[in-house]
Image: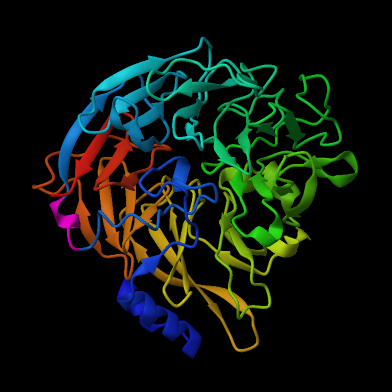
């Protein structure tokens, strides 16, 4: 069924109204940012909404003019996503990206020239992404030495600061810094997982660093009753890594006090042993306390069949005033289920509001935003298991019951999508695509004759869209920029 037919097939007046509104109104983000022209963290903000609402520089009117601006050749493949800072002292706009060897680059956004490099020593790999300090002058970067480092954005020089470099693991040869860093509530957030092959010993955990005092808290997904970083022998349970693209996600609603979420991968779920494999952890802002959790009733089956719930992280929906569950989130995973969850009481065991069957496993971070009337759309990239991008509407009936409904599919393939001015950008192997958010129609691709060239293969890489340009890395070791005219 094509996109138009899917919209027409939506039953019920509430769903039809939402579909009609999405077809004609400008879309605005539910989460704002302090520095509108920056892309300071993975997916644009701490809630990982994948859209900066103040930037309309790339839109449906000019997207067809996107053309190759430059290609920066990195020293190694960056299996991650850059961040963008609009004003860096002595340089102007810059991009910052960390490659798989843990080397971070400061890149001139106008030319693609590499301004500086920073690389601590280490023997394994990372797929993490830097994050911008609120002062706009410093960045925090992942590495392969088991630490997060604070750097001067203009020079790439390491900066002395309370708590930094911040230790993430006692054994970086076994525990991987896979997910992008995040920052909110006055804290830096990082998480760990294992490497390819899931070979123990490792224990997924969230590390939270107070940026003012340097105080660090560690919440372990297994043996959660034990504080601090654990060695391989300290916890009998193993795995439950935190490796989703969004990593630690911050709740944007002030009523929940800045709580943060992380989803875990395969591992035991035994509450009496404080083991939280294949679960969503809802933590206090300082990362010290488990406030709530969600665990599917079939968590044991998921773990036994390598169907990590934590292949993706919770995506926050904006408040829905007419709903009996106004604060919601969605969670996908490798189990081919999309869970609608009530953030006020995330569900403990099998407490979801709704389950929706998906056609493929999900390894990406969904994009979530709403239109002027408050209707919500969720976009999910299904790459690598399926060459498909799907969108879901979120509707509420007269009794206050909120449900997800399929809106459209686009057979383009894509990792984590981002949205700007009614456009959905997704990257796949060899092609970067811009879709119409109303119906999934392809409006531009990097393989077009006028685009000037295309990207290479893709794994975790995903685009960012800011200040009139689209930036995306690939498996060829390139960071590519496209700009509008």
Q: How is the image coloured?
A: rainbow
Q: Is residue 63 magenta?
A: yes
Q: Is residue 455 visible?
A: no
Q: Is residue 132 above or below residue 434?
A: above
Q: Is residue 323 above or below residue 175?
A: below
**Could you tell me residue 35's position as x and y percent?**
42, 46
Q: Is residue 157 left or right of residue 106?
A: right
Q: Is residue 122 left or right of residue 35?
A: right
Assign the N terminus to one quadrant of the image.
bottom left
Q: Is residue 313 above or below residue 409?
A: above
Q: Residue 240 sits in which quadrant?
A: top right
Dominant SS of magenta comes to: helix
**Could you tell me residue 22's position as x and y percent?**
37, 75
Query: Which sits in the foreground, 466 or 261?
Result: 466
Query: Residue placed at 44% from the left, 80% from the top?
Result: 18
The magenta stretch spans which residues?
Answer: 61-65
């Amino acid at each position: 069924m094509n996109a138009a037919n899917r919209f027409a097939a939506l039953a019920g007046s509430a769903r039809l109204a939402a579909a009609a509104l999405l077809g004609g109104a400008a879309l605005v983000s539910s989460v704002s940012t302090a520095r509108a022209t920056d892309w300071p963290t993975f997916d644009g903000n701490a809630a990982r909404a994948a859209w900066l609402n103040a930037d309309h520089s790339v839109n449906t009117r000019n997207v067809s003019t996107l053309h190759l601006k430059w290609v920066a050749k990195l020293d190694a493949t960056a299996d991650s996503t850059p961040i963008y800072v609009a004003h860096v002292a002595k340089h102007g706009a810059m991009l910052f990206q960390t490659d798989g060897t843990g080397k971070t680059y400061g890149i001139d956004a106008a030319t693609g020239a590499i301004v500086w490099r920073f690389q601590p020593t280490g023997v394994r790999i990372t797929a993490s992404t830097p994050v911008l300090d609120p002062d706009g002058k410093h960045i925090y970067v992942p590495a392969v030495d088991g630490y997060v480092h604070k750097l001067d954005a203009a020079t790439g020089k390491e900066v002395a600061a309370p708590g930094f470099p911040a230790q993430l693991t006692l054994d970086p040869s076994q525990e991987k810094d896979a997910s992008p860093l995040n920052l909110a509530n006055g804290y830096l957030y990082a998480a760990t997982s294992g490497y390819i092959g899931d070979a123990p010993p490792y224990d997924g955990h969230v590390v939270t660093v107070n940026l003012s005092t340097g105080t660090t808290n560690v919440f372990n997904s297994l043996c959660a009753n034990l504080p601090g970083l654990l060695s391989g022998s300290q916890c009998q349970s193993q795995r439950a890594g935190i490796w989703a693209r969004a990593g630690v996600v911050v709740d944007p609603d002030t009523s929940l006090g800045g709580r943060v979420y992380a989803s875990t991968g395969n591992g035991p779920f035994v509450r009496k042993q404080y083991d939280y494999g294949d679960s969503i952890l809802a933590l206090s802002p300082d990362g010290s306390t488990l406030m709530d959790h969600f665990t599917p009733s079939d968590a044991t089956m998921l773990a036994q069949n390598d169907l990590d719930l934590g292949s993706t992280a919770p995506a926050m929906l904006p408040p829905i005033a007419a709903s009996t569950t106004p604060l919601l989130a969605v969670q996908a995973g490798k189990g081919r289920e999309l869970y609608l969850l009530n953030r006020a009481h995330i569900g403990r065991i099998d407490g979801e509001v709704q389950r929706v069957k998906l056609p493929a496993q999900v390894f990406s971070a969904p994009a979530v935003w709403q239109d002027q009337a408050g209707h919500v759309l969720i976009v999910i990239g299904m790459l690598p298991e399926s060459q498909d991008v799907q969108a879901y509407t979120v509707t509420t009936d007269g009794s206050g019951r909120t449900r997800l409904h399929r809106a459209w599919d686009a057979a383009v393939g894509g990792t984590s999508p981002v949205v700007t001015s009614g456009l959905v950008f997704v990257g796949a192997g060899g092609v970067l695509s811009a879709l119409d958010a109303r119906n999934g129609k392809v409006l531009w691709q990097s393989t077009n004759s006028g685009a000037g060239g295309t990207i290479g293969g893709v794994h975790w890489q995903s685009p960012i869209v800011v200040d009139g340009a689209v930036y995306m890395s690939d498996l060829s070791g390139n960071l590519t920029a496209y700009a509008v005219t």
